[in-house]
């Protein structure tokens, strides 16, 4: 890079230019290939336009502003009346407006609340993955809104008017009844102080009050509290039940949701997460009494897919920043990118991202086809928690490694890396931590009446044997998933097998071989760049990751 402007004591040079005004789609060969491999090749032009829009300097600036200017709680108005509203910086609203206009909140649904046909899930997952690279906090209400329509199918009379509002491409942040708005967002409240993940320990109660219920209690975490309505869990006479709780009552008055405080979080700073009290709030039942978990898990399954896509997106942006920097930065008379050890590290990081995006879009394809294909439904049910376990757990350490590639430049707040690093842990925690994901995989295998889930494992195992040339591993044993204490090992290996199989559909054979050798045939506890990826393979992987300018 040529010398920069003069300062009082020195010239600025040997710095990489800002990574701005980039095409997040066409510069990402693994993403382009995975989109085509999973049936969304017809979306290529639209995805490229989306990638160019979200890669602009303007979008990166909005992301920075939304995170530097965090939400503020306004409990009362100027006259002392309770309002329980949250104020956001205009940049947050601009990001929401762009995501809603692109349909990230609803493109997988029709106006009647039916599932949109394939490849709606794959196309949306690709967009979500690109959006998360720029700013992820605002995606919390986006993902919950999209996912909430699934459990609402249990109440057709409620689904129809809500879906009609949701599927509009209009973002309306005004604080008024949802039925008066041009578009609406939906949130979720599940966890309480005493239970956390164990929602059966919830003590919030719901009493029948004619055509609705009165809910009294609390939620320890309720993200995006400015949504127009929420799906919440409460104990009804018949057991734990799912309810639809709007911010306004039918007469136009404000419902009794009392926002106690906003959480001061490690990351996810642009998004408001709150503690809330329900002081006799009105809500409408969704599904049967006692079927709360079975009802809301349909929403959770979809939000978990977004956790995987977002974490893969974080990794992608960290990788792009590292590769971009290393191509310009010279050390010891040679660009970092051309230093053998650094190239091996970058290639290893790129290999991890390539597998993550291949797995994400293969999983989205399973959601696309689940209604018509029991095996794809089983794949979605089984691989979603496994993928969330591995990809979301991998992201924080991955981003740290990418940050190290930039040295001190990656550690300062002017870089996007610190924000990505803070953001990454939330997806491994939200919607079920790692142990919960492993238990869900075990349950899927034990409870599948048609043995479809077991068939998915067997198919992945067979493909792994073919890819590695190795003998059948512990997955070949009938009781491999019966040892709960060893579940993390089994589920991690399952996710790697699924990633390898997905990668086989979209990547060159040499890339697949490198992934299989370094992830399936090497022992655990690996460090990036420590597996000796051949130089010729490094060239292929890095050119796919980010084409040279």
Image (tube, helix red, strand yellow):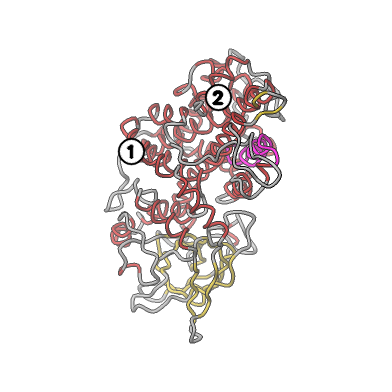
Query: Of 366 and 360, which appears nearest the observer?
Result: 360
Q: Residue at x 35, y 50 (%)?
A: 106
> Is residue 504 visible to us here?
yes
255 displayed left or right of 466: left
Residue 244 picture quarter = bottom left
Q: Start and end of the magenta stretch?
A: 390-408
Q: Earlier in the sequence, mark 1 or mark 2?
A: 1
Residue at the image point whose x is 68% and y is 18% from the top:
532
Q: What residue is disc 1 on? A: 46
Label 2 packing within 10 angstroms: few (<14), some (14-19), many (20+): many
- The crowding category of the residue bearing disc 1, from other C-alpha atoms within 10 Å (few below 14, some 14 to 19, many at least 20), is few
Of helix, strand and loop, which one carries label 1?
Answer: helix
Question: Looking at the magenta stretch, what is its main secondary structure?
Answer: helix
Q: Label 2: state its secondary structure.
A: helix
According to the image, label 2 marks what residue?
A: 542
Q: Decide whether residue 366 is among the magenta residues.
A: no
The quadrant holding residue 13 is: top right
- 311 or 68, which lies in front? 68
Residue 322 placement: quadrant: top right
Q: Are marks 1 and 2 in contact (CB under 8 Å)?
A: no
Residue 462 spot, x, y in % from top left = 52, 19
Find out whether residue 399 is within the magenta segment: yes
Q: Position of residue 254 (x, y in %)?
A: 42, 77
Q: Is residue 436 visible?
A: no
User: In the rendering, at what x and y percent does residue 241 appear?
Assistant: 47, 62
* Residue 155 versus residue 478 in the image, above or below: below
Give the residue drawn at x 30%, y 69%.
Answer: 180
The alpha-carbon separation of the residues under discs 1 and 2 comes to 25 Å
Pick out the residue farthest to the top: 469
């Amino acid at each position: 890079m040529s010398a920069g402007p003069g300062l009082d004591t020195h010239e600025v040079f040997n710095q990489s230019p800002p990574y701005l005004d980039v095409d997040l789609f066409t510069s990402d060969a693994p993403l382009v290939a995975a989109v085509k491999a999973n049936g969304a090749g017809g979306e290529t032009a639209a995805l490229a336009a989306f990638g160019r829009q979200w890669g602009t300097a303007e979008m990166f600036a909005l992301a920075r502003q939304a995170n530097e200017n965090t939400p503020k709680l306004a409990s009362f108005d100027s006259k002392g009346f309770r309002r329980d509203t949250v104020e956001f910086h205009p940049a947050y609203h601009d990001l929401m407006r762009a995501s809603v206009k692109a349909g990230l909140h609803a493109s997988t649904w029709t106006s009647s609340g039916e599932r949109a046909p394939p490849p709606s899930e794959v196309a949306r997952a690709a967009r979500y993955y690109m959006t998360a690279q720029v700013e992820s906090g605002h995606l919390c209400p986006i993902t919950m809104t999209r996912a909430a329509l699934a459990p609402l199918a249990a109440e057709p009379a409620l689904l129809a008017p809500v879906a009609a509002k949701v599927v509009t491409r209009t973002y309306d942040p005004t604080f008024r009844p949802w039925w008066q708005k041009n578009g609406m967002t939906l949130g979720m409240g599940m966890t309480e102080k005493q239970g956390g993940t164990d929602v059966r320990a919830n003590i919030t109660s719901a009493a029948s009050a004619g055509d609705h219920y009165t809910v009294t209690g609390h939620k320890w975490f309720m993200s995006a509290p400015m949504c127009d309505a929420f799906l919440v869990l409460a104990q009804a006479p018949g057991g734990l039940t799912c309810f639809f709780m709007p911010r306004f009552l039918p007469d136009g008055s404000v419902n009794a949701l009392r926002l106690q405080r906003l959480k001061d979080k490690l990351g996810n700073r642009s998004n408001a997460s709150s503690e809330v009290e329900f002081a006799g709030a009105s809500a409408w039942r969704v599904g049967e009494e006692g079927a709360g978990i079975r009802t809301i898990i349909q929403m959770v399954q979809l939000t978990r897919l977004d956790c995987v896509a977002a974490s893969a997106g974080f990794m992608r942006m960290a990788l792009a920043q590292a590769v971009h920097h290393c191509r310009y930065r010279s050390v010891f008379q040679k660009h970092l990118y051309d230093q053998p050890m650094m190239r091996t590290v970058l290639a290893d990081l790129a290999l991890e991202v390539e597998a993550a995006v291949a797995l994400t879009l293969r999983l989205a394809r399973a959601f696309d086809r689940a209604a018509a294909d029991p095996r794809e439904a089983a794949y979605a049910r089984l691989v979603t928690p496994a993928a969330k376990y591995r990809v979301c757990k991998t992201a924080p350490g991955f981003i740290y490694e990418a940050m190290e590639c930039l040295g001190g430049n990656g550690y300062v707040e002017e870089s996007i890396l610190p924000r990505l690093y803070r953001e990454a842990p939330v997806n491994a925690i939200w919607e079920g931590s790692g142990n919960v994901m492993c238990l869900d995989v075990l349950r899927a295998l034990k409870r599948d009446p048609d043995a479809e889930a077991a068939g998915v494992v067997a198919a992945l195992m067979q493909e792994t044997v073919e890819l590695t040339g190795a003998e059948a591993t512990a997955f070949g044993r009938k009781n491999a998933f019966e040892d709960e204490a060893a579940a993390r090992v089994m589920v991690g290996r399952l996710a790697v097998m699924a990633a390898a199989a997905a990668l086989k559909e979209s990547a060159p054979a040499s890339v697949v071989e490198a992934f299989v050798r370094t992830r399936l045939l090497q022992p655990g506890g690996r460090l990036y760049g420590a597996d000796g990826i051949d130089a010729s393979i490094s060239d292929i992987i890095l050119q796919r990751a980010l084409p040279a300018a």
